[in-house]
Image (tube, rainbow, N blue to C red):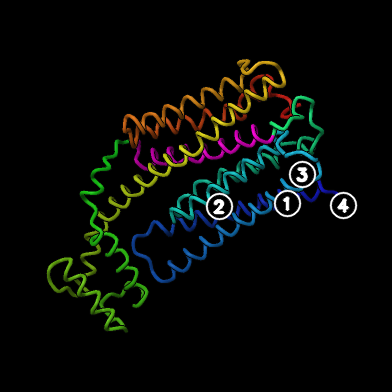
Amino acid sequence: MNWDIIQNLASQIVFILLLFGVIFYWINLYLFSFTLKTKFQLRTENILFNLGKFSVIISNCLLIFILFSRWIIAGYFPLSNLYESLLFLTWSLLTISLYVESKTKSKLIGATLIPLALLINGFSNLTLTPEMQKASPLVPALQSNWLMLHVSMMLLSYGTLIMGSLLCILFLTISFYKKVDFNKIESEKSLKSINFLSELANTYLLVLPANNFNNIASDHRLQKYHKALISELVGFDISSTKLIEMFENKSLELSKINKLTLLENLDNWSYRILGLGFPFLTIGIISGGVWANEAWGSYWSWDPKETWALITWIIFATYLHARITKGWKGRKTAILGGLGFFVIWICYLGVNFLGKGLHSYGWFS
């Protein structure tokens, strides 16, 4: 049994599944942009979201199979070359994406993260030569128990920090680089006027024909209950025709407040994710220093990758310091996080492309 062929085939299937996942998530994101949805749109949205999530889960399982099979066959943790690190990074991104998506219930997470995972997987499959994709014996310096701890922590930090910084870039994109006043959210947002009206609109679309508010709902008790709540909201009894007019007048306000709420959620979750990735990066740098002292007799040698890892650490340390001690939120911290996105890629790949150092072996021949 040729395991190289099986692993390459599984990796190509991952690429195809992620491609379909991106399509499903993006179409679902387009449908999600509608404030009022018909029954058909709601069903289609749920189906596409579940299909996209299912493709990501299957892709993640295949990546686990590839990594574990290489581990068993080669006899060491599969993080010794560029191809294996790209697979591990893709798995990290997909795992974190699924976790955050399950916590936030946001359909924007997958639409943002899965394309990046697709590009990474495509680069590993379509750009690297078959020789670079094969598992090779470890060079003497890599034959250490520190390999698993140091490299896995660094790649976990890359995956986590990339996701958090990508959310920062998304924040800047949606806000058009303008300052966002989060205090406005609490002052303008009313749970009754926003969440309730949105749910009520979707409920009416489910019990009545599409966009036909003038008909009487089949469940008169449901209609009576809804009208009672509306009456409490606006202070007087309201007809179905008035309900349509009210939704039309509220649509612009609803869109603005939903945008502010989305920006607040992006800001909070980017902070949480970057706060999780920073300890991974710190552990990775410390374990790398201990390993370097064991292998070369020096904790720090200002190797290009070591230098850029330190720059990455300083940027995200500044981000967390500004959030925790200065109370920065919104655009200022999003700029720091967005800058970190590009620094991570320079540290991870750019150093190996542009220069040589102690970390060049096992990546490019």
Q: Which mark is residue 70?
A: 3
* The quadrant where residue 309 appears: top right
In the image, residue 294 sits, relative to residue 29, either above or below, namely above
**Point 44% across, 33% down: residue:** 337
In the image, residue 122 sits, relative to residue 356, either above or below, namely below
Q: Nearer the viewer, mark 4 or mark 1?
A: 4
As for residue 212 lying within the magenta part, the answer is no
| Along the viewing direction, whichever of 38 and 65 lies nearer the viewer | 65
| Along the viewing direction, whichever of 288 and 64 lies nearer the viewer | 288
The amino acid type of the residue labelled 1 equals: Ala
Circles 2 and 4 in contact, beta carbons < 8 Å: no
Mark 4 → mark 3, Cα distance in angstroms: 14 Å
Q: Residues within 10 Å of mark 4 (few under 14, many from 20)?
A: few
Element under disc 3: helix
Mark 4 → mark 1, Cα distance in angstroms: 14 Å
Q: Nearer the viewer, mark 3 or mark 1?
A: 3
Q: Nearer the viewer, mark 4 or mark 3?
A: 3
Q: Residues within 10 Å of mark 1 (few under 14, many from 20)?
A: some
In the image, residue 293 sits, relative to residue 206, either above or below, namely above
Mark 2 → mark 4, Cα distance in angstroms: 33 Å
| Along the viewing direction, whichever of 195 and 274 lies nearer the viewer | 274
Relative to residue 9, is residue 183 drawn left or right? left
Q: Which residue is mark 4?
A: 1
**Point 30% across, 63% down: residue:** 198
